[in-house]
Image (cartoon, rainbow, N blue to C red):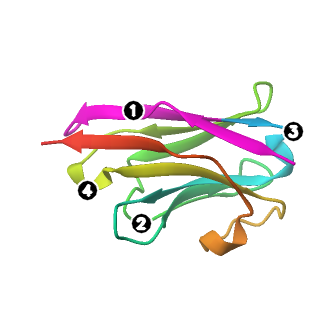
């Protein structure tokens, strides 16, 4: 069973940058669709972005397009989320998630493996 562990969250000022990491164990990331979701208190978990099999299949949520970038280091079995031009509205707990199908979907119920989450707080 694949396990995911996120890191890299923290506090940052409006307009700043952070890079989140998601390390997988018990399986290889390049055989999975992997991505990020985020959740604010009292709100539903929101799709941020995901990479399917092969780097050509990358999708982003509308609220982060042009600011966030996904990448995957297969040698390190790690998924990254580079977040630039951060806004207070990006404040949330960010979760790494994986599904066995190679097709990227935005529905959180289609992802069967989740990390524990990492907090990102963007201050004005």
Check whether the beta carbons of the residues at disc 4 and disc 1 lie within 8 A of each other: no
Name the residue tied to disc 2.
62
Name the residue tied to disc 4.
89
Report the magenta stretch's main SS: strand
Residue 101 among magenta residues: no
Instruction: Please give the range of residues in magenta.
Output: 1-22
Label 4: element kind: helix
Find residue 94 and report its horizontal and vertical position in percent: 48, 49
Residue 50: assigned label: none
Label 2: element kind: loop
Badge 1 density bin: few <14, some 14–19, many ≥20, Cα 10 Å? some
Check whether the beta carbons of the residues at disc 3 and disc 1 lie within 8 A of each other: no
Which of labels 3 and 1 is toward the front?
3
Label 1: element kind: strand
Label 3: element kind: loop
In this picture, is 94 found above or below 40? above
Check whether the beta carbons of the residues at disc 3 and disc 2 lie within 8 A of each other: no
In this picture, is 106 found above or below 77? below
Q: Residue at x 36, y 42 (%)?
A: 120
Find residue 105 and report its horizontal and vertical position in percent: 66, 70
In this picture, is 70 found above or below 46? above
Residue 26: assigned label: 3
Q: Residue at x 77, y 66 (%)?
A: 103
Name the residue tied to disc 1.
18
Find residue 41 and report its horizontal and vertical position in percent: 34, 62
The answer for how far apart the CA atoms under marks 1 and 2 are is 19 Å
Report whether 96 appears left or right of 63: right
């Amino acid at each position: 069973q694949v396990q995911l562990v996120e890191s890299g969250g923290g506090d940052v000022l409006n307009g700043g940058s952070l890079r989140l990491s998601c390390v997988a164990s018990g399986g290889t990331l390049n055989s999975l669709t992997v991505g990020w979701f985020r959740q604010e208190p009292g709100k539903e978990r929101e799709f941020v972005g995901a990479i399917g099999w092969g780097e050509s299949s990358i999708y982003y949520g509308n609220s982060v397009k042009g600011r966030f970038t996904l990448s995957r280091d297969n040698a390190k079995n790690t998924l990254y989320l580079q977040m630039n031009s951060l806004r207070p509205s990006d404040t949330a707990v960010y979760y790494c998630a994986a599904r066995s199908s190679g097709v990227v979907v935005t529905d959180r119920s289609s992802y069967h493996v989740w990390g524990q989450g990492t907090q990102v707080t963007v201050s004005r």
